[in-house]
């Protein structure tokens, strides 16, 4: 027995749920990462907007106040700082000729003592950047005032974003916790759903185990859905149907072989045991034994054909033009005996059928008709279109007819209602029935004692 190793020991249900959870975890991980990145980008974008909005009034004041005949830069700084309300997330630093001049009230840190002061003092163009202060992460915007290539002063607006980033981190943690709970719920639902989805597979396994043990060849899986598992169940049931048919055919073949071969084997054994030393008698006994062996060979051939008749590859179907086909069979049948042969082919149809098998069936019926009639009797081979759209082939004779009590068992291989010709196996009519059934057709017998017999083979356009 093959033992599962590693991941295979988990089982299909566990592997399906695990794969589902892995995909969910990856998806949620990517989602949280994107959420954090987008959130931080939004915070930076919002901070930039705040900085530009805060610096715009200063630019306007500088343009109005430092023109010809205007006041000093320190007055602009003072007016700007007085006009700005105190905020916990924003602070202002003014630099005059590279040195700190004034800091807005309520700033969470001493802006004039930050290491970036020297860098801000050297800037000659408006510059934006970020830094870390004792109050957390910040974004800053430096707006220098330049005249005659000389930096007169600089306004630095600092936006403190640490509170927003902490709020974002808290949101990410909350979403992570909610996601973890959802993953647990999803795992439970996936476990239940996978279990329900695998019910047909478990039924299939139990059925296969039952069939492999030979306990129940009639076991089938109930088909309750039209999805892939339903298709699998239907395919498995169809396979079991074929297996059961094969086993039945095998058993029937063995039963028939045992039944049919018992008599010739007994005859051969009896004559072999009684072989005489007389050459003439020995030759007669050997000829009889060889004849019985030939009959045994024909029996085995016929039994094999009957056994194969239930296999899918029994027929080699091709388009058959019915009327010319029937005329050809009649030409072959004329060699079976000196009778009045009549051909009635007026179907005008084409069948999807095995011409070789149908020829074999019709010639078997014609052979039986020859043996049941005498010189001068009439045998008709014909074909016509049935009312339902099928095609009916028939062989009719003017012989003595068949007793109605025997008609019901005419095609039963275990009974002999028609005399067997010398050297025959008695399986000709069962073979006819098997060939017709393999085509999806049916056999009907119409016989009147003293009038004659007509055997009809009704076939669909295509074999089932």
Image (cartoon, rainbow, N blue to C red):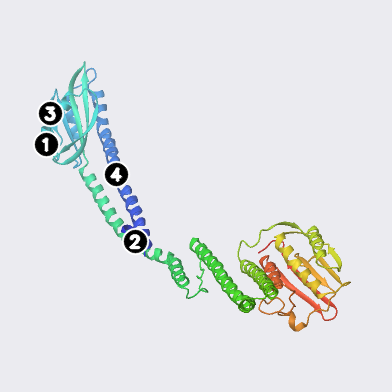
Please give left or right for residue 53 compared with residue 401 in the image: left
Q: Which mark is in front, 3 or 4?
A: 4
Q: What mark, if any, has residue 110 been given in the picture?
A: 1
- Distance, label 3 to label 4, CA atoms, is 35 Å
Q: Nearer the viewer, residue 380 or 265?
A: 265
Mark with earlier residue (3, 4):
4
> In the rendered view, would you say 40 is above or below 152?
below
Comes first in the chain, label 3 or label 1: 3
Q: Earlier in the sequence, mark 2 or mark 3?
A: 2
* Residue 190 seen by the camera: no
Instruction: State the residue position of label 3.
Output: 101
Question: Label for residue 30?
Answer: none
* Marks 2 & 4, CB-CB < 8 Å contact: no
Q: Residue tagged by mark 4?
A: 39
Which mark is first along the chain, 4 or 2? 2
Q: Between residue 331 and residue 463, name the one nearer to us.
A: 331
157 with respect to 251 (left or right): left
Rendering coords of residue 134 (x, y %): 13, 40
Query: Looking at the picture, how far across and down is residue 450, in whole percent?
Result: 85, 81
* Secondary element type, mark 2: loop
The span from disc 2 to disc 4 (Cα, nearest Å) is 47 Å
Q: Position of residue 85 (x, y in %)?
A: 20, 39
Q: Earlier in the sequence, mark 1 or mark 2?
A: 2
Query: What SS does tag 1 mark?
Result: loop
Q: CA distance from mark 1 to mark 4?
A: 28 Å
Disc 1 and disc 2: Cα gap in Å? 68 Å
Label 2 crowd (10 A; few <14 / some 14-19 / many >=20) = few
């Amino acid at each position: 027995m093959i033992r599962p190793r590693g991941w295979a020991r988990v089982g299909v249900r566990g592997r399906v749920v695990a794969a589902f959870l892995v995909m969910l975890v990856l998806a949620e991980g990517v989602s949280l990462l994107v959420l954090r990145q987008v959130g931080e980008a939004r915070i930076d974008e919002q901070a930039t907007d705040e900085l530009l909005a805060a610096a715009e009034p200063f630019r306007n004041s500088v343009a109005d106040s430092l023109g010809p005949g205007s006041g000093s830069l320190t007055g602009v700084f003072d007016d700007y700082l007085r006009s700005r309300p105190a905020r916990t997330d924003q602070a202002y630093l003014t630099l005059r000729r590279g040195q700190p001049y004034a800091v807005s009230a309520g700033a969470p840190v001493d802006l004039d003592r930050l290491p970036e002061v020297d860098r801000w003092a050297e800037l000659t163009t408006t510059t934006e950047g970020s830094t870390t202060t004792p109050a957390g992460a910040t974004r800053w915007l430096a707006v220098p005032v330049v005249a005659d290539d000389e930096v007169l002063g600089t306004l630095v607006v600092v936006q403190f974003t640490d509170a927003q980033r902490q709020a974002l981190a808290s949101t990410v943690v909350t979403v992570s916790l909610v996601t973890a709970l959802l993953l647990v719920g999803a795992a439970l639902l996936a476990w239940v759903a996978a279990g329900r989805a695998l019910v047909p597979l478990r039924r299939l396994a139990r059925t296969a185990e039952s069939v492999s043990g030979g306990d129940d060849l009639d076991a089938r899986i109930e088909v309750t859905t039209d999805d892939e598992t339903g298709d699998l169940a239907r395919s498995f049931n169809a396979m079991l149907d074929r297996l059961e048919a094969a086993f039945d055919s095998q058993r029937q073949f063995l039963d028939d072989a045992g039944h049919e071969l018992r008599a010739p084997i007994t005859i051969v054994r009896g004559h072999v045991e009684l072989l005489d030393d007389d050459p003439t008698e020995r030759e007669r006994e050997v000829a009889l034994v060889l004849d019985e062996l030939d009959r045994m060979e024909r029996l085995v051939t016929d039994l094999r054909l009957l056994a194969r008749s239930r296999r899918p590859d029994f027929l080699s179907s091709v388009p058959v033009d019915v009327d010319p086909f029937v005329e050809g069979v009649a030409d072959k049948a004329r060699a079976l005996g000196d009778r009045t042969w009549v051909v009635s082919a007026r179907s005008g149809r084409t069948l999807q059928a095995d011409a070789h098998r149908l020829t074999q069936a019709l010639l078997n019926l014609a052979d039986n008709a020859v043996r049941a009639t005498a010189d001068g009797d009439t045998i008709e081979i014909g074909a016509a279109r049935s009312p339902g759209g099928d095609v009916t082939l028939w062989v009719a004779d003017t012989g003595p007819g068949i007793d109605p009590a025997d008609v019901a068992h005419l095609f039963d291989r275990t009974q002999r209602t028609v005399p067997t010709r010398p050297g025959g196996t008695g399986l000709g009519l069962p073979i006819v029935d098997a060939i017709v059934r393999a085509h999806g057709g049916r056999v009907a017998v119409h016989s009147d004692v003293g009038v004659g017999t007509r055997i009809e083979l009704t076939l669909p356009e295509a074999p089932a």
